[in-house]
Image: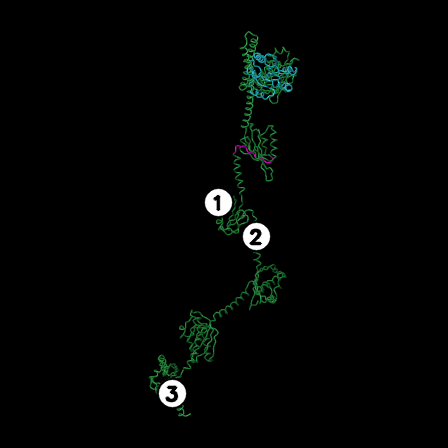
Chain colours: A cyan, B green
């Protein structure tokens, strides 16, 4: 299983990673400090490099979460339907939730810091925890 | 003959006499009776001798027998009639002649059996009866007179005709009833009558009737004086008074006629059936001025022009057919030097024995009358035309308030029929006027003799009438007209002008040319310009002095052309230069053809409202900004504040479950420290932002010279500039200063310069240019440009000045710098714009208020 975490905050990125590890999710975690970096990784790499899970922050400079999704849309439409994209945000803005709900590519929205329930939402098949 | 013979003859006569012959002594005893007594009375002579004569007489006749005896003794032969008693008892009428012989001391009586004669008498009596009836019931006055003309008998006719009963006349002398003038005539005639024993006739004489009036009588008299059975004048008279009178009248008429004919001032002439003039009166002669002989025996047509002659002939024929004709004839008598004349002609047919023999004509010269009639008529017609042509209603009243004239306009206005009003009392026709203005005014006109002029409301018709009444000797002449519309519009105008003059609004009336005709006090109160200052000029010329608001003037001009009411808001200046806002309602006044004759503009001072609007706009802007800031805050709270908090919470979680000695623990603790610091920074930022906002409201502005501020900033960042090899060029003239806040200006330049350093291009050394130029709006415009990385304008858009927005990945910027720049600029009532091109550079333009 391949997981991508995109967040411009280094602390946040570290935290997310640590929590996943705490839950025993250790394999293949890629972290990106900018959306552009992540996009390059996904689109340039081979099919095998397609992540199974993307955890995406929204508020980022240059390319924010929404812009990232727009850029990824062609690829996603082609062969990334199995990829679960989850918005990971510290925002309490209600509108973000509404927009995420309506977006076809988004599987769900989870708040920072990541709770046990959120882990269960993202990884429902994992029972280890 | 000898005596013997005579005696013998006498005896024989006695013996054979059929009549009863007897002698009676003084005492009534029979001395001798002849043999006839046997035949008449049934007695022998011897039986009667010495018997009393009266014993053989019917008792009722004894008196008359005795009377006859007495009469006879007066030496008068007497006749009498008596009924004798026959031996058989039957009554025998006997007529006696009685003679007294003094010598013989005896009555010699001869009695004749009158039985036969009685029958005859009876017949006579019947005749007599008829005669009496005739006398009684006839109208003739039958009178019997004796020789001395004393009344013996008077018939009923006398009573009927003259009123006298017989007893009033009988015994009286007729001459005393006869008019003294007629007495000699009567006497003369009567004496002739005596002489000639003839029937006489008196054609007329006057006789006094019972009432004392003289009546004319016609009498025939018959001398019967010698008739022993009558012995009287038998007269029969008729009352011929009427006849005499009518005769007199006829005579009188005749004289009248002559007088009328000859003395008539009008022309009178007689034409026979052929139209020939048979007689003409002196007026005719004098009118034509010719001799009478020249007129007579000629037809009138000889004197008339042909056309008149034909008319004349027609009328003559009509008169001859038995009709009275009356006509006016206009005739030209130039040949008699009389000119045009008008005659009133009456033609009267004259009928004798049911046949018309001719025609009398009375011709009255009415030329003068006709002329004056014509003139009067003409005058009246002219006057009538004048009255009728008076467009006002008109009427005249006499001194008793009676209508004497009413024209048609009167009827039209009041809905009356003048035919029914003429002659009636005005107060009877319009009783409601008696208690009001109308009566007072009319009365005043009549009393003072002066014309009155007044307006008067007729409630019944809901109309105002304007009346002018002119008194004269004849009464009042009154003109009036319906002024309802004008009174109403006057009243309306009065009200309107009251409103217009008293309203606090300004009212301006301009002509179609836009030049002021009238303004009210409100206008002066609003603008300070008096009526005399603005009349004849364009109000906008004054009110917009020095204002270049040509657009609104143009709009007004365009709208005025459309001829429809419109409303426009205008900023104008009062005489003292004060700015005021007016709401102007402009209404065009149109004539009947739809052309604008003038405009009415009503100005309402809406300065307060406008100011309120400005305030409201300001408030709206403020509110908008507050709202926007609140959104920013929400964002900060939801992200920039929340984000470190979330991290801290997460790290804390890790730390509690991680071995303190492990590497992770140390790393996490480090992150925790860093994140807490981040949180602190955010809180400090927020504090700063809030403080700017507070100052924004509270701070006063000061004069700040720009160049020194820029130099201070450059100096403060000198170290960093040097380390990157950057260069700052300040091109701001000495003394250029703005109205603002020194700290804000410092913050603005500091943030911009530090951004320029942060986002410099790695490929070239940094160059910053700070220039200053004049701005038309605010006075000062500063441009701040660098040759750094720049950003994508399309992508960044409005977000460039937003809090915590960053557009570069690697730089250490927090995304607060430009937010603060904008906040500071706006706090000084300035504006900021940005132009940028990726990898070429960025320029900021800041407009600020020049120091005054």
Helix, strand or loop for disc 1: helix
Residue at label 3? B35
- Is residue B634 magenta-colored? no
Q: Residues within 10 Å of mark 3 (few under 14, many from 20)?
A: many
Whether B100 is drawn above or below B402: the answer is: below
Whether B272 is drawn above or below B41: the answer is: above
Which quadrant is home to the C terminus of chain B?
top right
Residue at label 1? B437
Q: Alpha carbon of mark 1 to alpha carbon of mark 3: how far?
A: 133 Å
Helix, strand or loop for disc 2: helix
Residue at 47% x, 70% y is: B241
Q: Which segment is the magenta one?
A: B503-513
Query: In this image, B72 relative to B426: left or right?
Result: left
- Is residue B510 magenta-colored? yes
Which quadrant is home to the N terminus of chain B?
bottom left
Are the two marked residues, 2 and 3, in contact with CB atoms closer than 8 angstroms?
A: no
């Amino acid at each position: 299983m391949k997981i991508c975490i995109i967040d411009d905050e280094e602390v946040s990125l570290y935290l997310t990673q640590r929590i996943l590890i705490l839950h025993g999710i250790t394999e293949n975690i890629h972290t990106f400090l900018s959306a552009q970096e992540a996009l390059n990784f996904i689109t340039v790499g081979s099919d095998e490099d397609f992540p199974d899970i993307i955890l995406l922050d929204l508020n980022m400079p240059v390319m924010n979460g929404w812009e990232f999704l727009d850029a990824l849309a062609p690829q996603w439409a082609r062969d990334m339907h199995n990829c679960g994209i989850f918005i990971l945000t510290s925002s309490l803005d209600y509108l973000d939730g509404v927009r995420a709900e309506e977006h076809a590519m988004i599987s769900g929205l989870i708040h920072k810091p990541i709770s046990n329930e959120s882990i269960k939402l993202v990884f429902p098949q994992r029972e280890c925890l | 003959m000898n005596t013997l013979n005579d005696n013998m003859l006498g005896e024989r006569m006695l013996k054979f006499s059929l009549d009863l012959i007897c002698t009676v002594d003084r005492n009534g005893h029979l001395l001798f009776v002849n043999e006839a007594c046997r035949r008449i009375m049934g007695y022998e002579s011897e039986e009667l001798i010495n018997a009393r004569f009266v014993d053989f007489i019917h008792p009722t006749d004894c008196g008359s027998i005795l009377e006859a005896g007495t009469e006879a003794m007066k030496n008068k032969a007497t006749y009498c009639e008596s009924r004798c008693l026959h031996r058989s008892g039957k009554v025998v009428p006997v007529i006696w002649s009685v003679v007294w012989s003094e010598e013989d001391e005896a009555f010699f009586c001869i009695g004749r059996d009158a039985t036969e004669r009685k029958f005859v008498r009876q017949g006579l009596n019947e005749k007599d009866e008829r005669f009496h009836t005739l006398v009684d019931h006839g109208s003739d006055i039958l009178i019997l007179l004796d020789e001395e003309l004393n009344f013996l008998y008077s018939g009923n006719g006398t009573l009927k005709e003259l009123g006298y009963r017989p007893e009033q006349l009988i015994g009286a002398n007729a001459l005393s009833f006869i008019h003294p003038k007629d007495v000699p005539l009567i006497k003369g005639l009567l004496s002739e009558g005596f002489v000639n024993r003839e029937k006489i006739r008196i054609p007329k004489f006057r006789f006094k009737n019972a009432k004392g009036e003289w009546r004319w009588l016609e009498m025939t008299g018959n001398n019967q004086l010698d008739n022993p059975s009558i012995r009287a004048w038998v007269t029969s008279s008729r009352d011929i008074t009427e006849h005499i009178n009518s005769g007199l009248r006829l005579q009188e008429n005749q004289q009248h006629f002559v007088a009328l004919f000859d003395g008539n001032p009008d022309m009178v002439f007689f034409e026979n059936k052929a139209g020939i003039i048979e007689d003409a009166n002196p007026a005719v002669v004098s009118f034509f001025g010719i001799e009478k002989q020249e007129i007579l025996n000629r037809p009138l047509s000889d004197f008339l022009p042909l056309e008149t002659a034909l008319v004349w002939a027609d009328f003559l024929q009509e008169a001859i057919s038995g009709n009275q004709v009356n006509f006016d004839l206009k005739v030209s008598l130039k040949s008699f030097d009389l000119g045009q004349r008008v005659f009133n002609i009456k033609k009267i047919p004259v009928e004798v024995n049911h046949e018309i023999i001719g025609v009398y004509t009375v011709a009255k010269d009415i030329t003068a009358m006709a002329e004056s009639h014509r003139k009067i008529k003409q005058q009246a017609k002219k006057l009538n035309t004048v009255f009728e042509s008076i467009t006002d209603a008109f009427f005249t009243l006499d001194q008793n308030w009676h209508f004497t004239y009413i024209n048609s306009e009167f009827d039209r206005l009041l809905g009356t029929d003048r035919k029914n009003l003429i002659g009636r009392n005005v107060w009877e026709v319009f009783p409601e006027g008696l208690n009001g203005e109308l009566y007072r005014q009319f009365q005043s006109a009549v009393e003072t003799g002066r014309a009155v002029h007044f307006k008067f409301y007729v409630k019944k018709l809901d109309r105002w009438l304007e009346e002018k009444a002119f008194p004269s000797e004849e009464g009042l002449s009154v003109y009036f007209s319906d002024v309802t519309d004008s009174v109403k519009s006057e009243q309306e105008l009065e009200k309107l002008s009251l409103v217009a003059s008293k309203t606090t609004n300004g009212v301006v009336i301009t002509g179609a040319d836009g030049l002021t005709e009238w303004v009210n006090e409100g206008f002066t109160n609003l603008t300070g310009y008096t009526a005399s200052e603005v009349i004849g000029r364009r109000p906008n010329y004054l009110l917009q002095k020095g204002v270049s608001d040509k657009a609104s003037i143009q709009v007004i001009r365009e709208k005025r052309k459309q001829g429809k009411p419109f409303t426009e808001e205008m900023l104008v200046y009062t005489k003292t230069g004060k700015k005021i806002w007016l709401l102007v309602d402009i209404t065009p006044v149109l004539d009947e053809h739809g052309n604008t004759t003038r405009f009415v503009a009503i100005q309402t001072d809406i300065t307060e409202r406008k100011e309120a609007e400005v305030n409201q706009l300001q408030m709206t802007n403020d509110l908008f900004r507050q709202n926007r800031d609140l959104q920013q805050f929400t964002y900060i709270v939801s992200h920039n504040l929340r984000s470190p908090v979330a991290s801290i919470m997460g790290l804390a979680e890790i730390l509690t479950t991680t071995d303190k000695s492990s590497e992770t623990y140390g790393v996490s603790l480090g992150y925790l420290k860093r994140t807490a610091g981040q949180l602190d920074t955010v809180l400090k930022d927020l504090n700063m932002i809030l403080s700017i906002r507070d100052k924004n409201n509270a701070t006063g502005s000061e004069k700040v010279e720009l160049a020194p501020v820029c130099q201070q900033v450059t100096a403060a960042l000198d170290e960093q500039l040097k380390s990157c090899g950057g260069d700052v060029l300040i091109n701001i003239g000495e003394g250029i200063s703005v109205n603002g806040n020194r700290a804000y200006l410092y913050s603005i330049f500091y943030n911009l310069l530090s951004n320029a350093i942060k986002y410099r291009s790695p490929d070239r050394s940094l160059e910053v240019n700070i220039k200053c130029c004049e701005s038309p709006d605010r006075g000062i415009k500063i441009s701040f440009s660098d040759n750094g990385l720049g950003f994508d304008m399309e992508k960044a858009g409005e977000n460039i000045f937003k809090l915590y927005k960053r557009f570069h990945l690697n730089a250490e910027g927090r995304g607060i710098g430009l937010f603060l720049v904008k906040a500071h600029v706006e706090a000084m009532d300035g504006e900021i714009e940005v132009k940028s091109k990726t990898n070429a550079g960025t320029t900021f333009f800041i407009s600020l208020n020049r120091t005054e």
